[in-house]
Image: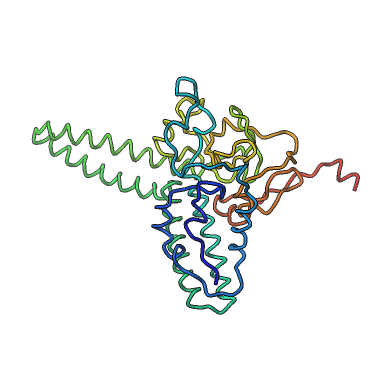
């Protein structure tokens, strides 16, 4: 009997290396929490998760809380400036774990089919559909794919309000006219913001690529790019804590989900960093890089030391396959 991924597998806060909100996983993955697969031979992802926990040692990932208090965001208070923990992102971490659940469920569906466990395969396929629908909704909201229709709806509302405004003026009901005018101004601002978000994702330009090793310009830690947004998509409270408005380019620049090397800082794990704060090395970085999420997001490393993203990760962000440039001198030697 192989137990399906449980909440404790992916939301531990100690030496397992995963963190997140247990309530989130209970809400979306009830089947995973209580179901068992009647398959004698274990599936690949189950073996992977067990190996993942064995590889991450307690010394590297010290005990951490599921949800941190405000105090850990600063070095002795805001008057002394931010530290690296200010960019730690639980929403980015949960986004990665959603992706992991999607991969794992797809593998388990195929595993059940191979074992001719069709009832179990159907249950898992239904759960996979739920997860994919949830991911699609989050992606649409995050990337502004639904912002186009939202802008259109607001435009129709503005047209109706303007008609009502004209009627109020004609009837000399100036109090109502003033209220309608304020509503129109608010809707116009919201419509403009929705259109700008959708346009930003359509015309996104990134300085860094998936799997690329980078260094934080301010905090100095090494990290690997595992996700990207053309603008900051975090909550307003996160942006306030991270002081995003004090950045030279503010929130209107690419932001990256990065995996932080556990040797550099074992407490951050996943950070959300502005493009202006990242720097790629001019020379190949072949030094060891450890993180519990590396194994399921990347195939391995290329000749430049950067990680090679799996196909599903490239498809998630609509990124092309990257080929390491060939050195002309090497070609001549061959």
Q: Height in image: 297 above or below 304?
A: below
Q: Nearer the viewer, residue 61 or 320?
A: 61
Q: Position of residue 17 (x, y in %)?
A: 56, 47
Residue that appears at 34% across and 40% down: 191
Protein image colouring: rainbow
The quadrant in which residue 104 appears is bottom right
Residue drawn at 49 percent across, 23 percent down = 81
In this picture, residue 104 sits left or right of residue 180:
right
Q: Is residue 113 above or below residue 256?
A: below
| Residue 285 x/y as whole percent | 73, 39
Q: Say if 3 sits above or below 139 in the image.
A: below
Measuring from the top left, give residue 242's x and y in whole percent: 47, 31
Q: Where the N terminus falls, by quadrant?
A: bottom right
Q: Quadrant of residue 241?
A: top left
- For image coordinates 12% across by 37% down, the residue present is 168
Q: Nearer the viewer, residue 304 or 167?
A: 304
Residue found at the far right of this picture: 333
In the image, 79 versus 228, the foreground residue is: 79
Q: Is 282 positioned to the left or the right of 178 in the image?
A: right
In the figure, is residue 256 to the left or right of 155? right
Instruction: Choose between 19 and 147: the one closer to the eye.
Output: 19
Q: Is residue 84 above or below residue 324?
A: above
Residue 118: where, in percent of width, then height?
51, 78
Tell me which residue sits at (48%, 28%) in the image.
Answer: 74
Relative horizontal placement of residue 309, taking residue 124 as reference (left or right): right
């Amino acid at each position: 009997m192989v137990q399906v991924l449980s909440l404790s597998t992916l939301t531990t806060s100690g030496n397992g290396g995963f963190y997140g909100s247990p309530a989130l996983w209970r809400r979306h993955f009830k089947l995973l929490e209580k179901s068992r697969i009647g398959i004698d031979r274990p599936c690949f992802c189950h073996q992977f998760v067990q190996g993942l926990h064995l590889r991450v040692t307690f010394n590297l990932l010290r005990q951490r809380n599921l949800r941190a208090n405000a105090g850990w965001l600063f070095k002795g208070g805001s008057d002394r400036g931010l530290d690296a923990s200010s960019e730690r992102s639980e929403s980015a971490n949960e986004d990665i774990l959603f992706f992991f659940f999607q991969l794992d469920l797809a593998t388990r569906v195929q595993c059940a089919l191979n074992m001719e466990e069709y009832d179990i395969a159907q249950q898992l396929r239904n759960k996979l559909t739920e997860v994919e629908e949830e991911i699609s909704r989050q992606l649409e909201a995050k990337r502004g794919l639904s912002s186009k229709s939202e802008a259109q709806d607001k435009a129709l509302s503005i047209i109706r309000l303007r008609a009502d405004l004209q009627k109020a003026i004609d009837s000399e009901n100036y109090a109502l006219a003033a209220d309608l005018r304020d509503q129109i101004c608010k809707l116009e601002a919201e419509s403009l913001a929705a259109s700008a978000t959708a346009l930003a994702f359509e015309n996104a330009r990134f300085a860094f690529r998936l799997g690329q090793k980078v260094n934080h310009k301010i905090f100095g830690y090494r990290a690997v790019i595992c996700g990207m947004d053309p603008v900051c998509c975090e909550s307003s409270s996160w942006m306030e804590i991270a002081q995003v408005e004090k950045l030279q380019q503010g929130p209107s620049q690419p932001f990256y989900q990065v995996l932080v090397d556990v040797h550099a800082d074992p407490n951050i794990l996943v950070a959300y960093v502005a493009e202006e704060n990242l720097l790629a090395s001019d020379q190949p970085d072949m030094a060891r890089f450890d993180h519990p999420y590396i194994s399921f997001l990347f195939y391995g490393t290329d000749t430049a030391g950067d990680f090679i993203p799996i196909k599903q990760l490239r498809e998630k962000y609509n990124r092309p396959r990257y080929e390491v440039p060939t050195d002309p001198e090497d070609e001549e030697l061959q």
